[in-house]
Amino acid sequence: MSRLLLLALVVAWMLPASAAAAPGVTTGPLEGPVVLVEDGAMWIEDDGRYSSALMAGRTDGTRRRLLSGQFVEDLSSDGDVASVSIYPQLWTATIGGEPQAIEGLPSECASRNAAKLDGAVMVVSCGGYENHSVVVRRPGGAYRTFPAGSDGVAVAGRYAAWTAGPALDGTRVVLYDALADREVLRAGTGRHLYPIALQPDGTMLLGIGGSFEDTGVAWVARSSPRLHEFAVSPLSFRGFARDRVLALELDRSNVEGSGTRLVLLGLNGSRRVVASTRGLGRIVGAHYDGSRIAVATSTCNGSRISIRSASGPAFTPAAPRLCKLILSSPPTFDFNTRDRPRIAVRVRCPELTLRVCDDLVVRAADGRKLSSVSYLPGFDGGYNVYLNDAGVRRIAREGSMPVRLEMIGDGRSWGAGALQMPATATLRAEPEELARLRRCIREESRPAQASCPD
């Protein structure tokens, strides 16, 4: 026994770092960003019952729920303290302490949207789409209010940034020095701009918007006020520090499907991959603070967050295994509103996990395919699976039978082939529905393609 144990230890020591189980913390299905805070991370996950939760954890696996509510959003961090909006209240939070409500804001913030803070400086986005403003808390606790657009705020060090509102030549972004109490830069072109993030030296990362969607990212600095554009989408942004932008990209070169990769893009044009996945693996969240990178990779029921040095070798998580398809309710035979025969079933496919909803196929116990096409009409996991001719005749003949349900990929987003291990169940038709189907078969030559009215 001792020799076997020694051999196992030697083999484990010889495994590459990417294959070994990296320290991390597990989460539920992510519903928002992941941010580095203190020696761990915070994230927003699905709390069930149309609710979300702000969670905190460390790589030793410990985790705790800090706050929950129906609208938990706009999570950000200055490295030591996180700020989060749970409508209509703003909060600050640390991993080990109790969340603190942000109180004492000026009356302009009776309707508040988001807050970001970095040490003593805080900027709060207030109001609705009209009559919008920002309130800046300066070092010492004094507040200043400024008219603003409704396109986000950013803060780092002594600086805060916000949109100044539309002008004849496009939206301008204001850079404000909270210590000196003055505007130090106003960036703008003929396009729609908004702040994404700041560095403590005042370098701004801006989103560039189009008529219907965001089109790009650019940076400006006091020493270089013209826009320097990146070939990257604002939706891919995950962090900004030390003149580097962390971006999450799809890897179309992955022959097994579309993989994901995290890339550090330098303001000087440098580019370095710091994490990537292959096959069905997915990076679903990340953050960068200048020295560390938090990487959230999808699992069957949520994700796993690993925290790694930004200067270390590229991180390649082990390829995930197929998850088991979970049925929330058994398959039943019925008719849709157009009287077409179908199978209704609910499956558990939470967002940003490996339980991906794609094409649900129904087979008989002998492997024969019984379905032709499936639809996911809503977000509650309810599938409508339409039967082929063999499926209609078989259920009409047997009334109740064992079936196998398989979630199949189409090769466009999650790779070809099986996405989850099949689930078995018993398909039943109620007596009234069964009688209606049998009557339809006697009257219709192609019952799977025709309606079966009462």
Image: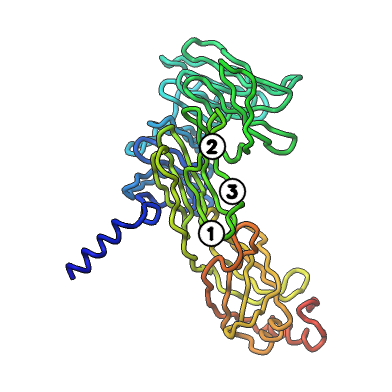
Q: Give the residue at x 54% y 51%.
A: 50
- Which residue position holds label 3? 250
Q: Is residue 87 visible?
A: no
Which of 183/226 is in front?
A: 226
Please give the label number shown on residue 263.
none
Q: Quadrant of the N terminus?
A: bottom left
Q: CA distance from mark 1 to mark 2?
A: 25 Å
Q: Is residue 17 visible?
A: yes
Q: Element type at marker 3?
A: strand
Q: Position of residue 323 (x, y in %)?
A: 49, 65
Q: Element type at marker 1?
A: loop
Q: Position of residue 325 (x, y in %)?
A: 52, 68
Q: Give the residue at x 78% y 81%.
A: 447
Sequence-first tag of 1 and 3 = 3
Q: CA distance from mark 1 to mark 3?
A: 12 Å
- Which residue position holds label 1? 280
Amino acid type indicated by mark 1: Leu
